[in-house]
Every structure is written in C-alpha cells, then in structure tokens.
Amino acid sequence: MRPYQPYRSSRPRDHFRGGGSRVIRSFNPAGIIAAAASSQSLAAPSAAYTPTISFETLPVDPRLIANIQVKGYTTPTPIQDQAISHVLAGRDLIGIANTGTGKTAAFLVPLIDKVIKNRTEKILIIAPTRELATQIQDEFVGFARNLGMYSVLCIGGVNIHPQRQNLRRPHNFVIGTPGRIKDHVQERNLILTNFKSVVLDEADHMLDIGFIQDIKFIVSQLSPIRQSLFFSATIDGKVREILTAFVQDPITISVKTGDTAQNVRQVMVKVPDPSRKIDQLHDLLLQKDYNKVLIFGRTKHGVQKLSDELVKRGFRADAIHGNKNQSQRLRALNKFKREEIKILLATDVASRGLDVPDVTHVINYDLPESKEAYIHRIGRTGRADSLGTALTFI
C-alpha cells in the first residue's frame, strides 16, 4: 500500500453519506455494547471448559477420527462435547449456542459416522445463507475424506442444472438453503421422505430472513420417522412454532454464555463530523494491528461504494453483497480467507455462520438494524478462544 497522505476527495464531502448510515432509532448501541466506550482492556476469556469426551476416543470409525486429527481438531468445544454422544445415540436434539461455537462439527461428525455404518442413510442439512451452506459443504469434504461418501450442494444464485444432475448420482448428504431445496422438491429432484436425518442450522436466522413458509413446507415433506437436529442462537415464538413440528422428545443442550462474545472488546467510535466518516475509517485501517478486518454496511450499494473507495485509496479490499453472484461472493470470501485481501466489506448476508479464521476486527460502519444483528456481526471475531475487537461507528 502506498504511504499514507491525508486524503482530500474532489467529491463533495457528503458523497459517502448515502451508504445506509441513517440512524435506526429502535436500536441503541450503547445499551448492548458490553464494554464501556472508555474501556481499554480486552474482555477476559471465559473459564476453561473441561470436556467429557475426546476426539481420539470417540466411538466412531477410526478413519473419521484420522480425518478429525488432520483437520487439527484437538479439544471438543462445549457444544461438540455435549451434542455428539446424543446424536450418535440417535436422539433428536435442540442445540442453543452462540455463533462460532463449533456447531458444524457437532452434527457432521456423528452423522458421517452414521453413514459409514449404513450406506443407505441420507442426510439433509439446511442453512439460511449460501455462504453458510457452502462452508458446511467444505467442512463435510474434510471430515469425509477418503470415506467414499458424497454430498450435493443446493443453493440459489447459481445454475440449477448441475444440481439436478448431481442429485441423480449416488449421494448421502444434501446441503442447501431453504428456497433452492424447495425448488428441487417441487421439481421432484429431491424426495424428502428418503431422508431419515435432518439438520436445521441457524434456525432463528432462517426465520428472521423470511424462510418460515419454506421451512414449514420442507418439514411437511419429511418422513415422520427421522432424527432431527435443531441449532439456534435464540428460541422465540416463531422458532417454537417450527420446533413443535420438527423434533420429537428432544435432548436440549444450551451452551450459550451470553448475548455477546466474551472474547470481543467492544468499542464505540464517535463520528463528530459525518462528512469525515470515511476518513476516520481510513485512519483506523492504517493502524498496525488491523490485520484482517470485516466491515459491515447496511445496503448493497453503500457497501460496494465504500469498497471501491478503499481500493482507490490503496487498501486491499473486496465486498460481498446481494448484487454479486455466488461465484463472485465466494471468490471475494476465499481471497479474504487466504489473506490476499486485508479487508472484506459485507452486508448482513455475511453476519451468520461464516467461519473465517483470525479476523482481528469487525467494524460496524453502519449501524445494524437490531441487537441480534449486532451480536451476529461481532461474532465473526474473537473465535476459538482468540481475542478480537468490534468497533461501532456512532
């Protein structure tokens, strides 16, 4: 990046005010930011958790244990420790946990072992966003390496024809988003009564973004004889409505420790002059510890405009939002994971479930619409016992 010089744009100063920075009056950031704005110390890590199981001694196929070790999993997280044994036993399960707590492995590991023991078993995994579904697919590939089992990724935003072809080939897992799964069911590419194990991941977010009717339709098509796994950060009225029809005599596990991540320092950044908001962001990003930064904006147009401006100023940045197709979004996300870019800008499509290692900072350039959106945004940092910082522009 070129040496920093104080930036003076030739455009009017209010050019950058149109990117969704209006105040959402129903949201009071000061009321939910756990650390005082003047706090300079990081939140203390949570007390050490002592698991009751180990990955090395799990009662699963030795080849699966070897794959777990290759992926670098050593000590189970609380949700993995408490859920895996129940899933292996065939129980329905409700898992309540903060985002970033290792839910994916908590259901993939026992379900892959289930398929090893019964090659006719079919597993359906439903996630709210394309990015999360793709991430689960990537995790599956690692856990199922050399085990002779296959999955089909069914998400929107890409050509449906290859998915139709893949569904005709032998497979044990279907991983996808509600809308595209519903499309395949209606086209009869997918017969849900064949699936005896079903996972709803990030169920509360699926309902928040308008998938309740699709989920009800999918649940109505499932075999009544099945194992159902339900993971959610919150359980409210809409979620309970789905739960009633989905699980039977479930085990409930809650490892949620609070609304916000304990390993995240939360800071308010006051903007005394809205016309210089972009310059405040610029100065922050120049600081030496801002190594891998995720910036959230409210609108697709605003996020893209901010990304373009940061690139113009010499930063390695890219953006993901709804105006980009799936391949473009994945390309940007992978560049961020590989640290080919330092900054990824996103709308809230990216605030759930994305597992990007070592994000040092989350910046709420525009205020989120709700407390829940805030919580899920800042959950992208401070993961896996690392420490992170979340900054919210006010």
Image (cartoon, rainbow, N blue to C red):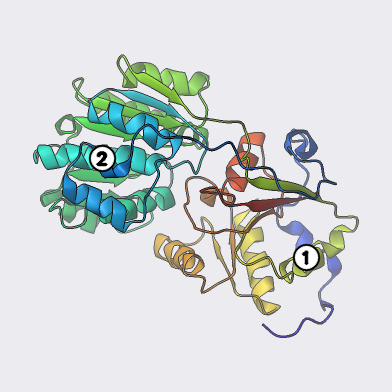
Instruction: Give the x, y percent position of residue 63.
Output: 17, 51
Q: Secondary structure at mark 2?
A: helix
Observer able to see residue 314 = yes
Left or right: 69 as drawn, with respect to 212: left
Q: CA distance from mark 2 to mark 1?
A: 52 Å
Task: Please state which of residues 13 and 235 is positioned toward the viewer in this rendering.
Answer: 235
Q: Nearer the viewer, mark 2 or mark 1?
A: 2
Residue 10 position (above or below residue 240): below
Amino acid type for the residue under numbered disc 2: Thr
Identify the residue at image location x=73%, y=37%.
34
Identify the residue at image location x=29%, y=42%.
108
* Mark 1 Cα-neighbour bin, 10 Å: few <14, some 14–19, many ≥20: many
Left or right: 57 as drawn, with respect to 376: left
Residue 203 position (above or below residue 23): above
- Tell me where residue 218 sits by quadrant: top left
Residue 278 image label: 1
- Tell me where residue 186 sits by quadrant: top left
Residue beneath disc 2: 57
Left or right: 388 as drawn, with respect to 161: right
Instruction: Give the x, y percent position of residue 266.
Output: 72, 46
Task: Please state which of residues 197 and 101 is positioned toward the viewer in this rendering.
Answer: 101
Amino acid type for the residue under numbered disc 1: Ile
Task: Please state which of residues 270 and 59 is positioned toward the viewer in this rendering.
Answer: 59
Left or right: 133 as drawn, with respect to 37: left
Instruction: Give the x, y percent position of residue 36.
Output: 81, 41
Instruction: Give the x, y percent position of residue 373.
Output: 61, 40
Identify the residue at image location x=51%, y=18%.
237
